[in-house]
Image (cartoon, grey):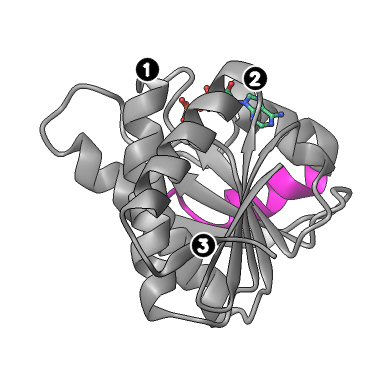
Amino acid sequence: MTCYQINQTRLEIVQGDITNQAVDAIVNAANTSLLGGGGVDGAIHRAAGPELLEECQTLHGCKTGEAKITRGYHLPAKHVIHAVGPIYGTQDAPVLLASAYSNSLQIAGEHHLASVAFPAISTGIYGYPMREAARISLRAVLTYLENHTTIKIVRFILFTSEANAIYREELESIAAKNDAINPCE
Ligand code: ADP
């Protein structure tokens, strides 16, 4: 595990399966329908059980770059924050990907959640190259954490060792240039 401290928050990079995370909220890489899909979305719905889809059906979708919260049902996580990332390749994709992260943290803060775990949104079916997504998502999360202090743990859960290595390298490179981001004790 890689861990950096920024203000009161631990930012952790871990290889694993997000459906196993016992945190206040896991973030889902959802689509605008919020009615389930493949990849991490499918895995989260399978692990949470059919009650999750029932609650999602009451939400009437979600715009790209935004997020909505539900309960976690049979997941070890208490809540699911359904964030919609962009499909790679459009001009506004970087801004929308950053918004998906910052809006998820905003919702976590509003619900007084202490721990949040993110997957690498948009890097599967939506085609984002892992390194570009890592840079954008880490910058978005770090910018948010530089200005807000209520969330204690933000964890990136990377499904593969390659993705884990890319996220670790990008975080180390950002931390090397920023005095406010230091290795955890
Ligand atoms: P998107 O449509 O936003 O691209 P995907 O679910 O296709 O979403 O992929 C997003 C990322 O989630 C990919 O890097 C994929 O490897 C990863 N992923 C898939 N299953 C899991 C899981 N159970 N836990 C964590 N990450 C996962």
Q: Nearer the viewer, mark 1 or mark 3?
A: 3
Residue 130 percent location from the top left of the image: 42, 23
Confirm or deny contact between disc 2 and disc 3 (CB under 8 A).
no
Residue 37 vertical position relative to residue 103 in the rendered view, above or below? above
Residue type for callout 3: Asn
Residue type for callout 1: Gly
**Alpha carbon distance from label 2 to label 3:** 25 Å
Residue 85 appears in the figure: no
How many dots with numbers? 3
Residue 105 appears in the figure: yes
Residue 78, located in which quarter of the rendered image?
Answer: bottom right
Foreground of the two, 9 or 120 = 9
Residue in view at x 38 percent, y 50 percent? 176
Q: Element type at marker 1?
A: loop
> In the rendered structure, does residue 163 fall within the stretch colored magenta?
no
Where on the image, by quarter, is ligand 1?
A: top right
Range of magenta residues = 50-63
Residue 184 percent location from the top left of the image: 65, 61
Q: Which residue is mark 3?
A: 182
Q: Which residue is mark 1?
A: 127
Residue 160 vertical position relative to residue 55 in the rendered view, above or below? above
Q: Is mark 1 within 8 Å of ligand 1?
A: yes
Foreground of the two, 156 or 48 = 156
Q: Which residue is mark 2?
A: 160
Q: Is mark 2 within 8 Å of ligand 1?
A: yes
Confirm or deny contact between disc 2 and disc 1 (CB under 8 A).
no
